[in-house]
Amino acid sequence: MNRIFDITLKDLLQLVRDFKTFMFLLIMPIIFTFLFGFAFGGIDGSADSRLPIGFLDQDGSWVSQALRDQLEKSDIVRIGAARIDSAQELVQLVADGDLAAVIIVPDRYGSHVLKGRTVRLIVFAETDSTAWTTVEAEILTAADRVDSAVRVATILEAIDAKRMPFDYSFDQVITAWEDPPIAVKETLSPVIKDIDQKTLSLAHTSPGMMLQFAIASLLTIATIIVNERKTRSLQRMLTTATRRIDILLGHFLTIFIMLFAQFTFLILFAQLVLRIDYLRVPFGTLLVMVSSILCISALGLLIGVLAKSDDQAVIFSLIPMFVFSGIGGAWVPLEFTGKTFSAIGHLSPIAWAMDGFKNITMRGLGIESVLLPSLALVGYAAVFFSIAAWRFQRVSE
Amino acid sequence: MNAIEVKNLHKSFGELKAVEGVSFNIREGEILSLLGPNGAGKTTTISMLSTLLRPDQGDALVMGHSIKEEPMAVKSVLGVVPQDIALYEDLSARENLIFWGKMYGLRGAALKSRVDEVLEIIGLTERAKGRVGKYSGGMKRRVNIGVALLHKPKIIYMDEPTVGIDPQSRRNILDSVVALKDQGMTVLYTTHYMEEAQELSNQIVIMDHGRVMADGSHEELVRIVGENDRIILGINTESAHVIEIWKAIPGVVHITAENSALHLLVEDSNQALPRLFESANAQNVRINSVEIQEPNLEAVFLHLTGRELRD
């Protein structure tokens, strides 16, 4: 047992000597967390996520202005490209994907509405897109509100023009829509109600980058194991009363300690600086963290045993980093990729680790939600370790 | 008493028979050299004796312990100096010695005191805190040897410890091997330098192609080739056509060609040389250089294998 710790201490001493690499592996995940967070639009909290639409007013009446006012108050759409007054240019922006739709208010739109006549707005949009359904509903809502306000004001003015003049009634009706009698109110679970768009985005990228760079850091320990074999120090160790399994466990413990320090630092950074609530369920986070580290440590051991040169150590570390991170949802959430890709992605242990962390930080779930991901990760750890041990025993040094 | 008894060891790697029926004994407190060119099977033999490789056939007893049945007991009495610098270059000499001492089971004050002693023995006390990676080749070799001495083993294996180092460091290492013997240690030393084997050894085992070609003291081995002298002649022409003629000259025992030189074993160089010059004249061959060597291990190897003792 002592020899296991002796090997671990020696490895850690070697790692500390390579201080620059060690720091690199702590700093890079933080930088990439911000980078990917920015890519998902999460860094700038003031960013407007409403769908952009064009609005070309060929009527110029106060009714068309009222319609514009309604759209500008929307939580769903926003009027972009306001300075462009060419229908052709606006339609091109829709074709280019810069605008979700363009509304053209035709000449005499206002007078037709005031006279109660049927009038059509002209809308250009990519009608096959999911955004169109949303935009269409929002335009119809705005147009209906203006139309109904005109009708109500017209009727009331006809009843009592002195007490309820048109302008007054119109304003009252339009204002009333700001607080409609029936509305759907969305509420979030209390456990996640404080999460804004920015934090949500970082809550995804934080575990993703943490896991990706945990695999990247295997390069350092794999190089130590490879050099041990290259310099014949391993062979020399085998001429002492040290068992092969002691050597394997010593290196395994080194990787575990290194990753534990890395994860602890990054989780605390995310908790304190990025406000991602890993510690909402501390034991759940600890469980996912430890099972992830077990899995990645075993993978590191396998890489060290299989690699025969420094170059191979680099390649064998980078391939699982890119493959497992890529398909495992560390870069793009598997929720966005569809069921098939998500199922394939779960062949990667990273996907299970992401599930575990996000169940706590994003989905507001409890410790029971991390049991299955943790079990899967421990399973991967057992497989990787068994292959490494089998290979290590078989290799004739 | 024999410290090591090697009995009919065999080891193959696929089709390659690396060691075939190797047997020899080493008496306690003596130095035995395994002498042979690269690929002779020396390192494979030493790997089996240090339990790194399991023999396909045969066995060996190291201080009475079977390498097959009691590998851990064998390891406990051994110190191994591998051919490579088996050290951690980013650690200091002291840190390396401490780590390896722990691997040999030393702890606490005993470890610290032994590390200090070994640093003194290898003459690196003053440089103990320096990283091994920044040491010269000779200093690294000394630490490499020092590691094997940490647990005061009864037997030490040294696998070509002088390969690739400067003459001064080589001298230091050879002196330290003799010093180890003087302290009562049994040394199994492999080399392809016959001078080292000749200088150090009580007993020499000559190996080639995985087999033991001869086994005995230096004097015993030299007697294999009798009192023959060795002559190296440089000539100005193709050697092939004179070899057959010179083989027939009385007193010439053996002759081989190497580039533009001929290596001859002769009964008496004083008598053979005039005949060789006479024959050279007759064949219109010009002799450019003459070198006469006393009987040595090189001659023994040549006699046994028909080849030079070199890579």
Image: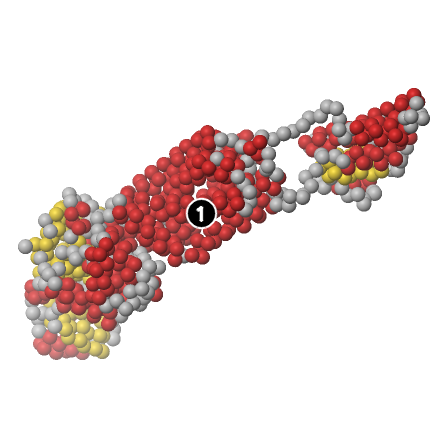
Return the residue at label 1: A262
**Which residue sits at x=67%, y=28%?**
A185
Q: Position of residue B97 (x, y in %)?
A: 26, 58
State which chain disc 1 sits on.
A
A20 left or right, relative to A155 = left
Residue found at x 71% / y 40% = A97
Q: Type of residue at label 1?
A: Gln
Report the front residue among A80 and B230.
Answer: A80
**Picture quarter containing residue A388?**
top left
> Which residue sits at x=7%, y=69%?
B227
Q: State whether residue B300 is above or below residue A156.
A: below
For this rendering, which residue is in front, A197 or A135? A197
Regarding residue B54, the answer to whether it shows in the image is: yes
User: Which quadrant: the N terminus of chain A?
Assistant: top left
Please indicate whether residue B232 sits to the left or right of residue A185 in the image: left
- Give the residue drawn at x 38%, y 46%: A257
Q: Residue furthest front?
A: A163
